Amino acid sequence: MKPEALITMTATIRPDILFQTLESFERNLFIDLHQYKIAINIDPVGIGIAKDVKDVVFHFFGKKNCYIRTPSRASFPEAFKWVWSCIEEEPDIDYVFNLEDDWKLLREHSLFSMMSRLEIEPDLALLRLPMFHANEKDMKNWNKFYPYNGKYYECPEELTLVTGFCGHPSLIRSKFVWDTATNIDTNINPEKQFHTTNVPVLDIVSKYRYGVVGVPGTGPLIKDIGREWLAGTNWQKKGNKAWFVEWELNENRE
C-alpha cells in the first residue's frame, strides 16, 4: 500500500497561484501517496474571498480530507503553528509535507524514496526539495555549501541551526513537526525560531540532521511563483521581511 502524508500549508487569497502549486505537486510528487490530507490556513490577504481558495483545495483533496482555518486577522506565526499542530489529529500519519502556496514543482520526483530515506535514517528530520543547482560534490544553499554524501546533500553539523530548516517544500517527520509546533511563539516569525530566539525549538532542532534531495548535475526542482503576484498587488510584508509576522497594504504604491 502506498504511504500517507499530511500536507501543511499557510496560504493567502490567490487561488490561481495555489492551483498552479497543487497541480504541479499532484502530478509530479503526490502520485506516490495512497492518501493525502491537507491542513491549510487561509489568511485574509489578497484579492477575492477565502471561498475562492477553498474551492481550489476541494478540487484537489475533496472536502473530507481538509482541515481549513480562515481567521479574520492575518498572522503568519499563528497560521504556521495551527497547520503544524493539526498533525495531532492524525496520529497514524508519520510524515508531513510542508508546502507554502506559491511553489511550482518543475519535474517528477519520488516522494516514496524520500520517505524510505527517513525510515532508514531516524536522526534525519527532513528532506527538502532544492531551489539550487546540484553540483557533483556539493550544493550551494544561499551562501552556504552542503556536501553530497552519495544519497542527498547533507547540511553540515555546524550549519544545523543556521540553514537546517527553512520554509521550502519539505518532507518532515511528524514527531519533529509536533514537538516544534507545541513550542512555537506566535509573536515571532516562525521560521526564525528554528535558528534563533526560541530555546526549546533550538534544542529540538539540534538533535537532528537535515538534507536536500538532488541528483548531481541537475537543476532546481522548485520555483517560487509568488513574487510576481506580490509585486502586482498593494500587499507587502510589514517591517523586516525576514522577520515578518503580518501583512499590510502599501497605500503609497500606484
Image: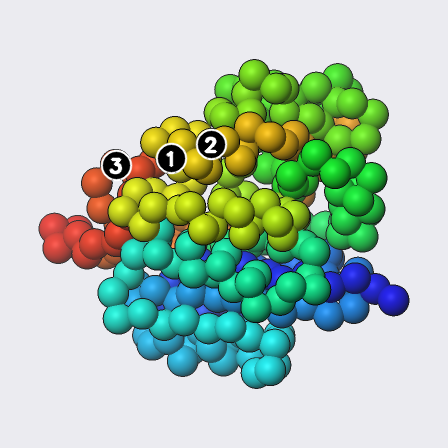
Residue 206 versus residue 107 in the image, above or below: above
Identify the secondary structure beneath mark 2.
Answer: helix
Alpha carbon distance from label 3 to label 1: 18 Å
Q: Nearer the viewer, residue 182 or 23?
A: 182
Q: Position of residue 46 (x, y in %)?
A: 31, 65
Residue 71 versus residue 97 in the image, above or below: below
**Residue 141 falls left or right of residue 70:** right
Q: Position of residue 83 (x, y in %)?
A: 47, 60
Which image quarter is the C terminus in?
bottom left
Q: Which residue is mark 3?
A: 240
Q: Nearer the viewer, residue 34 or 135?
A: 34
Alpha carbon distance from label 2 to label 1: 6 Å
Q: Amino acid at mark 1?
A: Asn
Q: Which residue is mark 2?
A: 202
Residue that appears at 55% across and 28% down: 206
Which image quarter is the N terminus in?
bottom right
Residue that appears at 47% across and 50% down: 181
Q: Position of residue 16 (x, y in %)?
A: 47, 68
Question: Earlier along the polypeptide chain: callout 3 or callout 1?
Answer: 1
Q: Nearer the viewer, residue 188 or 166?
A: 188
Question: Are discs 2 and 1 less than 8 Å apart at CB?
Answer: yes
Residue that appears at 63% across and 25% down: 155
Identify the secondary structure beneath mark 1.
Answer: loop
Task: Report whether residue 100 is seen.
Answer: yes
Mark 2 residue crowding within 10 angstroms, few (<14) / some (14–19) / many (20+): some
